[in-house]
Image: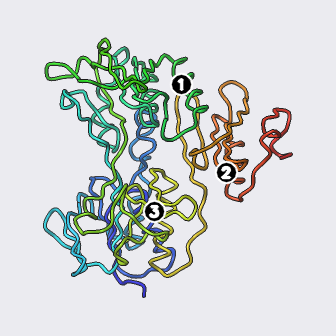
Amino acid sequence: MVPDSIVVAGAGQAGLQLCDSLRKGGFKGRLTLLGEEAWPPYQRPPLSKAYLLGAMARDRLFLKPESFYADHGIDLRLKARAVEIDRKAGRVRLEDGDSLAYEALVLATGARARPLDRPGAGLEGVHVIRGMADIDRLAPEIRPGAKAVILGGGYVGLEAAAALRGRGMEAAVIHRSERLLSRVASVETAAALQAIHEAEGVHIRLRQTLHALEGEGRVQRAAVERVEVDHVRRIHEAELEADLVVAGIGALPNQDLARGADLRTENGIRTDADCRTSDPAIYAIGDCAEREDPRYGPLRLESVQNAIDQGKIAAAAILGQPRPTEQAPWFWSDQFDVKLQSAGLPYGYDQAVIRKGAGRSQAVWLFREGVLIAVEALNDARAYMTGKRWIEQGRSPDPADLADPARDLKTL
């Protein structure tokens, strides 16, 4: 039966999408959306891109106008953090002592920045990039000629490096792996982006890790160590001057609320394909959820597409409606004058086909045993859209034909 009251813990992209989908799906009951921050749901991807660059005003970040919530009967409560679930009573307790009854509870608690566990991490000038408040704290420290050290060579770290370099700062990226984007992109795309960053003056330091931050009240130096992966030995390196440090070393799912309620958790709150947790009255969606994906198995993704899709899937399950058609996973990243768009997951590929375009344009097509599993396009929207469609349709071009620059994608 469709519940009469639904509480959503987490007012990000996933939580908002769920509420919107519930109302569009015909839900007429009580709907409460709890947000820990002081702002209504907003876009997070622009934080390390346009917002950090000062090219996007705060009001453009908000996903819906203020009137949307009242017009759709959504009780949006800000600065309201859920701290305990009483599954037997069907109630969720808030930090301020209030409690709410629910017939269905949706956990959309997101993820938090992985903390920097090194000496000096508490010095002034050390930042993370996760929420709007993080950027608001960082922005006043950006000034031309200042030196920034970015820890982590994933998307967040590289986007921050590009943004800070674009504001006239010196930027150095420290990454402990042998290549950039080691968990999220192909070797070929990572190499292309490294070349672009280096051409723009970003100093890339691979196979290195932070040893300590030093300073008197405020960070002034970053001591790093070279990591010899093959021989498991470390050689102390010279210190880097640092006026500010940005830690982009990954994120951890916010699953303490679920653990406290004895829900199943692993690399996120475990759910079935319909986003149900081990308690059938509780669902989990977005960055906090590790969903049993019908195509990939247990999977936790941090992306806009994942948040939107899971919001729709959970809403359909709550309403007893068929599961919506799922897209191939897709991502994007803006760095300097390059837009990276990718579809599919680049895990376990055994063949990469690169099609070069003009300037910094290129597309990398990834195959496993002759099957197209992912496409990564730099300034090539057509390749991205074509590859995404092929992956969703289960179609694969001949790699040899794709490698021929004379063959137009239309002919394939």
Which residue: 37% across, 78% down?
Answer: 280
Front residue of this view, candidates 107 and 395: 395
Q: Are marks 2 and 1 in contact (CB under 8 Å)?
A: no
Q: Position of residue 315 (x, y in %)?
A: 46, 72
Quick one: label 2 or label 3, which is nearer the N terminus?
3
Q: Are marks 2 and 3 in contact (CB under 8 Å)?
A: no
Which residue: 72% across, 53% down?
Answer: 390
* Mark-to-mark CA distance, 2 and 3: 21 Å
User: Mark 1 or mark 3: which is in front?
Assistant: 3
Mark 1 lies on a secondary structure that is: helix
Front residue of this view, candidates 317 and 119: 119
For label 1, the crowd category at 10 Å Cα-Cα, with few meaning under 14, some 14 to 19 and many 20 or more, is many
User: Which of the 4 quarters of the picture holds residue 356?
Assistant: top right
Q: Outermost residue toward the bottom?
A: 1
Q: Position of residue 238 (x, y in %)?
A: 31, 11
Q: Does any portion of residue 116 appear in the rendered image?
A: yes
Q: Does any portion of residue 53 appear in the rendered image?
A: no
Q: Label 1 amino acid? A: Gln
Q: Which residue is mark 1?
A: 194
204 to the left or right of 350? left
Q: Which residue is mark 2?
A: 388
* Mark-to-mark CA distance, 2 and 1: 24 Å
Quadrant showing the N terminus: bottom left
Q: Position of residue 192 (x, y in %)?
A: 59, 27
Quick one: label 2 or label 1, which is nearer the N terminus?
1
Q: Which residue is mark 3?
A: 291
Mark 3 lies on a secondary structure that is: strand
Q: Position of residue 215 (x, y in %)?
A: 18, 19
Q: Are marks 1 and 3 in contact (CB under 8 Å)?
A: no
Which residue: 46% across, 19% down?
Answer: 202
User: Mark 2 or mark 3: which is in front?
Assistant: 3
* Mark-to-mark CA distance, 1 and 3: 32 Å
